[in-house]
Amino acid sequence: FPNPICTNFNEYLQNELKESEFWQKAATEKQVKAIARFCEDMSNIHIILDQIKYSAPLAEEIFRLCHNYVTVYCHESRILDQWLNEIQWFEKAKTFHNAPGERFVGLFQLIDQVDAHR
């Protein structure tokens, strides 16, 4: 679960890069670099979305990290309700083969709201 001393999603991802077995063993160097650039500046969302498009395991790991972060750090019921709705849409979008970028953008937007309310 997320490190409780993290102040935002960016910091949480940076910690995961250092500690998670996925990033140390399963991810490619290009994927690790993409996440690191995304952590430096979350407006670089296209960098990580490009990598997610080509790697289902990476997409699953990013989703897991997003979900863990929101469920631990979000205390706004309105945002949690939106998160549940977004997850439902995310799952439906997978069924209809929507592009990964299309699915993840909504998740990242809600994470911005979580960070804004911390």
Image: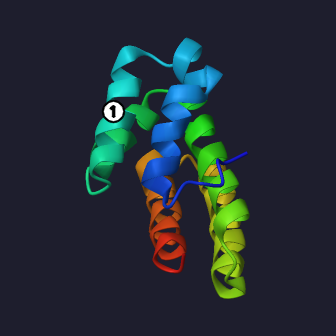
Q: Residue furthest front?
A: 5
Of residue 95 and residue 23, the one placed in the foreground of this image is 23
Q: Residue furthest bottom?
A: 78
- Can residue 54 be seen here? The reply is yes
Of residue 110 and residue 41, the one placed in the foreground of this image is 41
Kindly state the secondary structure of the residue where label 1 is placed.
helix
- 75 shown above or below 88: below
Q: How is the image coloured?
A: rainbow
Residue at 33% from the left image edge and 33% from the top image edge: 34
What type is the residue that disc 1 sits on? Ala
Residue at 72% from the left image edge and 61% from the top image edge: 72
- 56 shown above or below 110: above
Residue 80, position as x, y percentages in the image: 69, 76
- 8 shown above or below 63: below
Report whether 114 appears left or right of 71: left
Residue 62 sits in quarter = top right
Label 1 crowd bin: few (<14), some (14–19), many (20+), radius 10 Å = many
Residue 84, position as x, y percentages in the image: 72, 70
Q: Where the N terminus falls, by quadrant?
A: top right
Residue 87 sits in quarter = bottom right
Residue 114, position as x, y percentages in the image: 54, 72
Residue at 63% from the left image edge and 56% from the top image edge: 69
Q: Where the C terminus falls, by quadrant?
A: bottom right
Report whether 103 appears left or right of 71: left
Residue at 28% from the left image edge and 39% from the top image edge: 37
Q: Residue furthest top?
A: 25
- 31 shown above or below 102: above
According to the picture, the residue beneath numbered tag 1 turns out to be: 34
Residue 14, position as x, y percentages in the image: 45, 40
Number of labelled discs?
Answer: 1
- Can residue 99 be seen here? The reply is no
